[in-house]
């Protein structure tokens, strides 16, 4: 109770400093569940609230964070031809991963939360939890070497135009995290597409390019020096035959044969491949997805139908068989790219997905179909989930509209629709005179 | 390769379409002949429900069994024991004009403070419908007329006699008198005020003939009254009430019976002249609105009546002996009640006297007239509403909880699987009134649909109400709902939205439209 009293004492005045008060309120309700009681309506409330919902998604992402951070380092040394074993050079890979990851994570939250807090203070409503999840998702879907200023601009774009312009958490039409990524994709395409951006620590991922180390690396170097551990060596260059291409890039050029030439299936499954930070390791994503499904946070309908849609389209492509990419066996599409991450964490966003159960089936299935079409046919960028999900976000209200229309039609079949009681009275009076 | 697979897919699709067309034709034909009203029992494909559902309990007979999957049973501490004790301490009862939706706040009084009244004697009437009497449930002396804001009459308090005396009515014959005569008698004797009309859940309009009449014989809400106990020994009166009601509708009287646990009381299972439907499932399976939806849904320009079983027995007694007996069994439960039980008392009994010596003084209590989901908070000096048949007393939850949203210390009822509540399926929760979070915009979807076993999209309906879109509200089924039906949705709402008050706003809008 002492702590509670202390915290209550330092509460800023709401009128004098609305921004500080909003900030205080945000952190206070984070630490303490409020003491408000029910008033009118139900007298008892479920223990579930939006904070708990959101934080469970964040928990589901934690394994992706751990692996993604380490994999940044692993890919870096892989390109240099050093430490081929996954756990070799552990401290260097982890250090390099943290050096890349932390700024992305921190800046995403500074910009995103800053804008959230500012809008909350301006509109005088409490801070809503939406950015908790968006902020956890955005770093995972960026390439490790994304310039921080581009990241900040994209986050600001997504939060201001994607969310606050529509009225805040719960009101947005498009998935906020994907909006941030799609902004980078269209405004700064060279930083997020091609073969040269998916491995961190180089200006360009081409053979002969020298690794770039900064002050943070030298700091770690002196730390590792004290313990007699190996250190980052400047001047090392990418070996001659290395290519930073992702499995999808290879598949679009040479089909499945080209992919297996460079990566083993186990590598793609466990995720020790170049790619966006958090989306490479399939089992860890599946663990997160399992958590969301077991707790009922994410919709199994969306996940399952999206899987069905992708499998369906993959089989059609296999049958069609016009390009090498189409020939990739449909089940291997799940090993490449970010299908699972998009399925587990992006498509299931309840605000932007279809909101009726029937609608969720259609919504998920169409994402699966359209996403794979884009992946296979897009000549410039062989991946489609981001665009497919944003596309279906746009049409989710339309799907719901037709589901609701059919519900209304079912109901109106029970009797001629009549507005209000006026019609009721006249009809019933006729009945009652006949009856009496 | 492409050609072959396309041909194979084509053949499969053609086969599936032939099968499903045949299936549809069979069920359409069955429906035409009235064999298969809900399209589930006939057709080529057996329904999964029929194949895997639990078999019906042995006592289910004489009616269809409806299994409902959606909903949630909230188990709370302080369940009333199955024993009726007389409430000896209750001396005062009140009738509250505000209990009746749709009447003027200042009704015309027929008695004054100091008057002696008999049970069944008129107390006041509404100026718009001067032929409908609101009568006293007991005999005694009018001791107080309380007034509230704008001089609205809030309570007419009557001090009950030790020995009850009744106003003697001469009832028309239930069997062969004109329905109009029966209606006139119900209005005069005060029994008309026991009839609720749907849509809107308001006092029945005597100019409208109900298409059907629905009675739910069980309450599935937490800490609910057990009607099997309440109706014990009143089988004859209940049957008489059903007979009377049967004369007043162009359709049928529907009885919803409980197939969840033990066999219901004889009053219900042996009732005649009614359509029985058995219901099994979780709360809100006992809500009459849910039962209407699954038996004979309200057509969009029709009205139906709903009644409480104890009120049906009251009407029956009125026609048997000509007396209005305002006594009723009320359940008293909740974590703050020392000995939760069923109590025999009067309609509108004094809360204070009803709970005397039965309340725990640990922490502050909230007294709720009705159940914890759709009841209303009452003060100790208040009285039960005419419609309420239970009192629940739970703890107020006005304390902060460190990281309460993330790591709750005390167990709490929840429909969410993020709490390990599924490990303790029979735990009775000590729930309090804390909101467990702040109000937010609608974010989570599909949650309400799981809590309402009806073909309705509650979240979209709520949004239509907030937007004031009358046509959409009606289309999405607002007329099938009343507050108690969405109460469980409101309980489970992650965004802590006040669904019941939003719904009532919408119902009022619909009513004004007419």
Image (spheres, grey):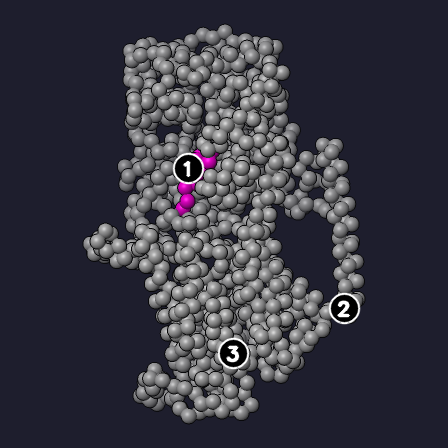
Label number found at residue A274: 3
Q: Locate residue A424, reporting x and y percent.
A: 56, 25
Spatial separation of the CA atoms under disc 3 and disc 2: 34 Å
Q: Is residue B12 left or right of residue A336?
A: right
Q: Position of residue B24 (x, y in %)?
A: 73, 43
Q: What element carries label 2?
A: helix
Quarter residue A337 falls in = bottom right
User: Residue at position x 47%, y 26% from top?
Assistant: B202
Residue at label 1? Answer: B501
Disc 3 packing (10 Å; few <14; some 14–19; many ≥20): many
Q: For residue A202, which quarter of the picture? A: bottom left
Q: Are marks 3 and 2 on the same chain?
A: no
Chain assignment, label 3: A
What subunit carries mark 1?
B
- The answer to if B392 sits in the magenta stretch is no
Q: Is residue B72 above or below residue A97?
A: above
Q: Which of marks 2 and 1 is nearer the N terminus?
A: 2
Residue shown at the point (58%, 28%) measured from the top left? B301
The quarter of the rendered structure image containing the N terminus of chain B is: bottom right
Residue at the spot of label 2: B2
Crowding around mark 1 (Cα neighbors within 10 Å: few <14, some 14 to 19, many 20+) is some
| Left or right: B32 in relation to B251 | right
- The reply to whether residue B290 is visible in this rendering is yes
Cα–Cα span, label 2 and label 1: 59 Å
Nearer the observer, disc 3 or disc 2?
A: 2
Please state which of residues B143 and B154 is positioned toward the viewer in this rendering.
B154
Q: What is the span of residues highlighted in magenta in the rendered image?
A: B496-507
């Amino acid at each position: 109770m002492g702590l509670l009293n202390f915290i209550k004492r330092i509460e800023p005045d709401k009128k004098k400093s609305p921004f500080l008060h909003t900030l205080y309120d945000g952190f206070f309700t984070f630490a303490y569940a409020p003491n408000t009681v029910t008033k009118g309506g139900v007298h008892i409330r479920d223990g579930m609230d939006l904070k708990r919902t959101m934080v469970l998604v964040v928990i589901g992402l934690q394994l992706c964070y751990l692996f993604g951070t380490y994999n940044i380092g692993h890919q870096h040394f892989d390109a240099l031809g050093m430490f081929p074993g996954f756990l070799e050079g552990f401290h260097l890979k982890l250090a390099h991963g943290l050096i890349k990851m932390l700024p992305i994570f921190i800046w995403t939250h500074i910009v995103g939360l800053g804008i959230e807090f500012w809008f909350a203070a301006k509109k005088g409503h409490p801070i809503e939890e939406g950015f908790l999840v968006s902020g956890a998702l955005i770093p995972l879907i960026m390439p490790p070497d994304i310039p921080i200023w581009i990241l900040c601009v994209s986050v600001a774009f997504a939060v201001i135009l994607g969310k606050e312009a529509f009225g805040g958490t719960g009101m947005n039409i498009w998935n906020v995290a994907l909006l941030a990524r799609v902004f980078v994709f269209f405004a700064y395409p060279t930083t997020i597409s091609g073969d040269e951006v998916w491995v961190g620590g180089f200006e360009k991922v081409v053979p002969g390019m020298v690794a770039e180390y900064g002050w943070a690396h030298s700091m770690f170097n002196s730390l590792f020096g004290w313990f007699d551990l190996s250190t980052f060596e400047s001047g090392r260059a990418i070996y001659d035959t290395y290519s930073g291409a992702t499995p999808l890039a290879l598949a679009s050029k040479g089909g499945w044969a080209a992919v297996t030439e460079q990566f083993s299936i186990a590598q793609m499954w466990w995720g020790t491949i170049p790619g966006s930070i958090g989306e490479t390791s399939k089992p860890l994503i599946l663990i997160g997805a399992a958590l969301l499904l077991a707790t009922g946070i994410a919709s199994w309908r969306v996940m399952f139908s999206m899987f069905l849609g992708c499998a369906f389209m993959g089989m059609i492509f296999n049958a069609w068989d016009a390009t090498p990419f189409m020939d990739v066996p449909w089940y291997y599409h799940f090993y490449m790219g970010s299908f699972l991450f998009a399925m587990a964490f992006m498509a299931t966003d309840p605000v932007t997905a279809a909101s009726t159960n029937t609608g969720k089936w259609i919504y998920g299935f169409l994402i699966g179909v359209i996403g794979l079409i884009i992946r296979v046919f897009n000549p410039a960028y062989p991946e489609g989930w981001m665009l497919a999900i944003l596309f279906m976000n746009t049409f989710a209200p339309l799907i719901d509209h037709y589901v609701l229309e059919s519900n209304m039609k079912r109901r109106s079949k029970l009797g001629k629709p009549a507005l209000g009681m006026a019609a009721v009275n006249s009809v019933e009076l006729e009945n009652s005179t006949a009856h009496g | 390769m492409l050609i072959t697979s396309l041909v194979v897919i084509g053949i499969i699709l053609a086969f599936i379409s032939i099968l499903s067309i045949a299936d549809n034709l069979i069920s359409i034909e069955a429906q035409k002949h009235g064999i298969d009203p809900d399209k589930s029992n006939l057709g080529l494909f057996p329904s999964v429900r029929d194949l895997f559902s639990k078999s019906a309990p042995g006592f289910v007979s004489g009616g269809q069994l409806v299994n409902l999957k959606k909903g949630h049973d909230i188990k709370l501490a302080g369940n009333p024991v199955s024993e009726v004790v007389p409430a000896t301490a209750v001396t005062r009862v009140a009738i509250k004009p505000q209990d009746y939706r749709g009447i003027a706040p200042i009704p015309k009084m027929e008695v004054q403070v100091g008057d002696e009244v008999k049970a069944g004697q008129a107390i006041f009437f509404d100026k718009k419908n001067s032929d409908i009497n609101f009568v006293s449930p007991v005999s005694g002396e009018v001791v107080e007329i309380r007034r509230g804001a704008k001089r609205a009459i809030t309570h007419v308090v009557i001090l009950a006699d030790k020995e009850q005396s009744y106003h003697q009515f001469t009832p028309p014959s239930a069997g062969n008198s004109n329905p109009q005569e029966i209606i006139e008698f119900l209005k005069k004797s005060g029994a008309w005020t026991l009839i609720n009309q749907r849509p809107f859940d308001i006092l029945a309009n005597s100019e409208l003939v109900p298409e059907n009449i629905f009675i739910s014989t069980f309450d599935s809400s937490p800490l609910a009254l057990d009607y099997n106990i309440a109706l014990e020994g009143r089988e004859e009166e209940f049957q008489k009430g059903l007979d009377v009601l049967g004369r007043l509708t162009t359709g049928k009287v529907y009885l919803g019976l409980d197939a969840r646990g033990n066999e219901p009381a004889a009053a219900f299972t042996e009732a005649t002249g009614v359509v029985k439907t058995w219901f099994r499932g979780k709360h809100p399976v006992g809500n009459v609105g849910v039962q209407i939806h699954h038996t004979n849904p309200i057509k969009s320009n029709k009205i139906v009546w709903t009644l409480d079983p104890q009120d049906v027995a009251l009407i029956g007694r009125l026609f048997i002996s000509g007396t209005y007996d305002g006594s009723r069994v009320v359940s008293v439960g909740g974590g703050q009640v020392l000995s939760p039980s069923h109590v025999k008392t009067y309609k509108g009994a004094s809360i204070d006297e009803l709970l005397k010596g039965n309340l725990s003084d640990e922490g502050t209590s909230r007294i709720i007239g009705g159940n914890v989901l759709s009841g209303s908070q009452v003060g100790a000096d208040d009285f039960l509403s005419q419609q309420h048949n239970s009192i629940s007393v739970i703890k107020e939850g006005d304390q902060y909880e460190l990281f309460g949203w993330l790591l709750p210390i005390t167990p709490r009822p929840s429909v969410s699987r993020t709490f390990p509540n599924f490990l303790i399926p029979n735990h009775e929760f000590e729930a309090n009134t804390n909101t467990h979070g702040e109000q937010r915009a609608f974010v989570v979807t599909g949650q309400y649909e799981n809590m309402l076993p009806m073909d309705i999209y509650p979240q979209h309906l709520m949004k239509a109400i907030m937007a004031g879109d009358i046509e959409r509200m009606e289309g999405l089924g607002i007329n099938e709902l009343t507050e108690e039906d969405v109460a469980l949705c409101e309980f489970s709402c992650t965004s802590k939205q006040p669904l019941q008050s939003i719904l009532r706003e919408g119902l009022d809008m619909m009513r004004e439209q007419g």
